């Protein structure tokens, strides 16, 4: 079920968000959202010609069969935020705009759909995080940091692919190079520095969390760690990203 959700996101990203027909027109994205939102809220049955809506409804039904109503709502809310964030990206493409660092860092957490995946960690693990624990400042901070790490790793590894297709306008490397007047190599190094700082902050916050957290919360945080590391492993082995770089690119060994 979780893997199928990842496949839905990849297909939606390539086939809708970045397509020539919708990806560069904010109004087109906005007009397409109501049918998806209604499918997500179970207000309507998708039509046979709505592949994304049909798949989204099927995934919702499968998640609902495994999760509590509260867990389903966490996932559903994260998906809605992700869908609305696509309007912002389309508006930037339409205006040929590279967002500011502040805007990008805020929106990257939502546009990357990572929160939708984090909302499935406890469902897939067969346990449930209590409401007060889900919204605890330590849990929220660690979720934000893990989301940043996944997003910034993706920006580093997918820069070559994105630069070919869309000028990499929604990529932290491009954002920093454009607004801080950095050379490409310096921008790459700055993202790496930010990444290292986020790792230190994550470790420090996890130590604070371990003083109070019950087992489900500890399992969730371990899931975040697996997500960060697993994303790196997947990306190094994915032709989608690696083959877009020059043949003589030297890749570090993940440790």
Image (tube, rainbow, N blue to C red):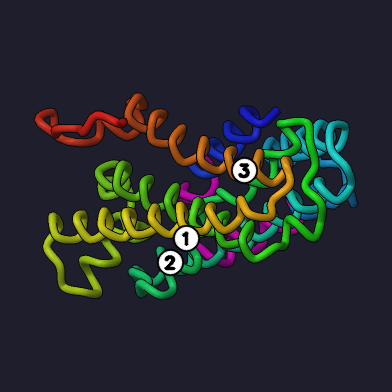
Q: Earlier in the sequence, mark 2 or mark 3?
A: 2
Sequence-wise, the earlier of marks 1 and 3 is 1
Q: Is residue 207 left or right of residue 184?
A: right
Q: What is the distance, in whole Å, between disc 2 and disc 1 at their CAs?
A: 5 Å
In this view, the residue in front, 209 or 104, is: 209
On screen, residue 91 versus residue 136, left or right, reads left
Q: Quadrant of the N terminus?
A: top right
Q: Relative to the observer, which residue lies in front, 205 or 173?
A: 205
Tell me if mark 2 has few (under 14), some (14-19) or many (20+) residues whose alpha carbon lies within 10 angstroms of its own: some
Q: What's drawn in magenta, residue-wise? A: 15-36
Tell whether label 3 touches label 2 (CB within 8 Å). Answer: no
Disc number for residue 105: 2
Which quarter of the rendering shows the C terminus?
top left
Dividing the picture into quadrants, the one containing residue 97 is: bottom left
Residue that numbered label 1 is attached to: 108
Establish if 5 lies above or below 199.
above
């Amino acid at each position: 079920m979780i893997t199928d959700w990842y496949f839905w996101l990849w297909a939606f990203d390539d086939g809708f968000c970045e397509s020539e027909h919708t990806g560069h027109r904010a109004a087109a994205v906005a007009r397409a959202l109501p049918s998806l939102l209604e499918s997500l809220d179970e207000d309507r049955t998708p039509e046979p010609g709505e592949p994304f809506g049909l798949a989204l409804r099927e995934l919702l039904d499968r998640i609902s069969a495994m999760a509590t109503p509260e867990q389903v709502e966490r996932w559903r809310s994260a998906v809605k935020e992700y869908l609305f964030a696509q309007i912002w990206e389309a508006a930037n493409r339409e205006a040929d705009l590279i967002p500011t660092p502040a805007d990008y860092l805020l929106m990257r957490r939502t546009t990357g759909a990572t929160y939708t995946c984090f909302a499935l960690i406890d469902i897939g693990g067969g346990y449930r995080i209590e409401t007060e624990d889900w919204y605890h400042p330590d849990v929220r901070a660690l979720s934000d940091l893990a989301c940043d790490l996944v997003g910034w790793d993706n920006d580093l590894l997918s820069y070559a692919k994105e630069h070919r297709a869309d000028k990499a306008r929604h990529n932290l490397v491009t954002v920093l190079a454009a607004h801080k007047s950095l050379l490409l190599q310096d921008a790459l190094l700055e993202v790496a520095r930010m990444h290292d700082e986020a790792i230190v902050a994550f470790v420090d916050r996890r130590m604070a969390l371990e003083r109070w957290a019950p087992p489900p919360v500890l399992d969730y945080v371990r899931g975040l760690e697996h997500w960060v590391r697993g994303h790196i492993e997947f990306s190094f082995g994915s032709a989608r990203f690696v083959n877009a770089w020059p043949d003589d690119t030297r890749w570090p060994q993940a440790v």
